[in-house]
């Protein structure tokens, strides 16, 4: 899907993500949060000058649930729990989700790489309520194919 200046940015980012948080993969309609999903800045706004057009460019935005957005906040790196090394967090614009994560039949997100391990831990991707939602979707066969 190409970005169209006449199309509202929020809806563009939402549709590009197929209405799923690009980190925990929960559909926005399944969110248990009272707040709504949002366009999350992959590279935080604070890292840019105020007038830098890249700050709010679609390539710097990901569709995120309130929980993932809140945990990511201004982070771009986190510690890989297996090696204790600082690595970049998952970037949905430049990386493929399935290269860093998989979902088990229990609904848990498994990390497949240092980026995956750091992201799972830093964003709390296996928060109990998210696991329950993924398990329900997985069980009824409505988990997304990648």
Image: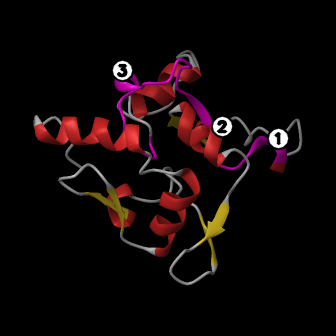
Please state the extent of the stretch shown in magenta in the rendering.
22-46
Give the crowd class for mark 2: few <14, some 14-19, many >=20 residues within 10 Å.
few
**Residue toward you, 55 or 46:** 46
Mark closest to the chain's N terminus, 3 or 2:
3
Counting every numbered tag in the picture gives 3
Mark closest to the chain's N terminus, 1 or 2:
1
In the image, which disc is placed on residue 57? Answer: 2
x, y (%) of residue 124?
51, 51
Q: Which residue is pictured at 55% across the width and 22% down the height?
A: 10
Mark closest to the chain's N terminus, 1 or 3:
3
Q: Inspect this view and state whether residue 113 appears.
A: yes
Q: Is residue 66 left or right of residue 96?
A: right
Q: Are marks 1 and 3 in contact (CB under 8 Å)?
A: no
Quadrant assignment, res 21? top left
Q: Are marks 1 and 2 in contact (CB under 8 Å)?
A: no
x, y (%) of residue 81?
54, 75
- The residue furthest left is 140
Q: Which residue is pictured at 54% across the width and 66% down the height?
A: 118
The answer to whether residue 119 is above or below residue 124 is below
In the image, which disc is placed on residue 29? Answer: 3
The answer to whether residue 57 is above or below residue 79 is above
Single out the mark in the foreground, 1 or 3: 3
Secondary structure of residue under mark 3: helix
């Amino acid at each position: 899907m190409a970005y169209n200046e006449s199309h509202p940015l929020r809806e563009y980012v939402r549709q590009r993500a197929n209405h799923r948080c690009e980190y925990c993969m929960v559909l926005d309609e399944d969110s248990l949060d009272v707040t709504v999903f949002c366009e999350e800045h992959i590279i935080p706004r604070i890292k840019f000058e105020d007038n830098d057009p890249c700050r709010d460019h679609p390539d710097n935005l990901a569709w995120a649930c309130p929980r993932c957005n809140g945990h990511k906040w201004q982070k771009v790196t986190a510690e890989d729990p297996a090696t204790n090394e600082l690595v970049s967090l998952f970037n949905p614009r430049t990386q493929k989700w399935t290269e860093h994560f998989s979902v088990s039949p229990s609904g848990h997100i498994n990390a497949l790489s240092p980026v995956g391990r750091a992201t799972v831990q830093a964003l709390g991707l296996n928060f109990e309520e998210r696991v329950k939602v993924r398990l329900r979707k997985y069980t009824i066969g409505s988990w997304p194919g990648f």
